[in-house]
Image (cartoon, rainbow, N blue to C red):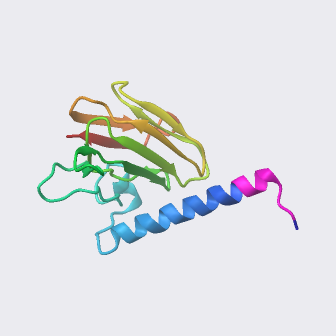
Amino acid sequence: MELSPRSRRRLAGLALLLSAVSLGATACSGAAMGSPGSASAGSGAAQSAPAATASMDPGMAMGPSGSTSAAAVTIHISASAYSDPGTVGPGATVTVMNMDAQAHTVTADGGAFKVTAPAGRSVTFTAPAARGTYPFHCEYHADMHGTLTVG
């Protein structure tokens, strides 16, 4: 049976999502997991580990030439709750992976960033260049809140 191009794209997207979920679970093995309610506050939730060494700032990774650059992080959305991405570097790429069946937004309370993540899809945005704490929320679900720390 031949799959349509649309079915192939959906299948590829599902495989990517499952792979990312699997990688996230591997990175979090052995870590304490909070309840779904605590994840919306950004505490005890699964987070992706930044590629960093002890001598470097969190959120920074070594580039191929030995220079440092902002490491990419992921905010997972599951059961209408955000995971805590930890501290990210200024200008880091932030991926939002929505594992729910409905769309969500990641909207900074002060307007520094806003992105809509369709159901079952991932989107990216660039972390602010200024260091600080950026509370965010979902425009569609008033009880969803999180914090992005740029350090």
- State the image quarter where residue 99 is shown: bottom right
* Residue at 43% from the left image edge and 42% from the top image edge: 143
- State the image quarter where residue 44 is shown: bottom left
Q: Is residue 88 above or below residue 76?
A: above
Residue 98 percent location from the top left of the image: 52, 50
Q: Is residue 111 above or below residue 31?
A: above
The answer to which of 110 and 13 lies nearer the viewer is 13
Residue 125 percent location from the top left of the image: 43, 36
Image quadrant holding the C terminus, namely top left
* Residue at 56% from the left image edge and 59% from the top image edge: 17
Residue furthest to the right: 1
Q: Which residues are magenta?
A: 2-9
Image quadrant holding the N terminus, namely bottom right
Q: Is residue 4 magenta?
A: yes
Q: Main secondary structure of the magenta part?
A: helix
Residue 133 percent location from the top left of the image: 23, 36
The answer to which of 81 and 119 lies nearer the viewer is 119
Residue 123 percent location from the top left of the image: 51, 42
* Residue at 58% from the left image edge and 49% from the top image edge: 121
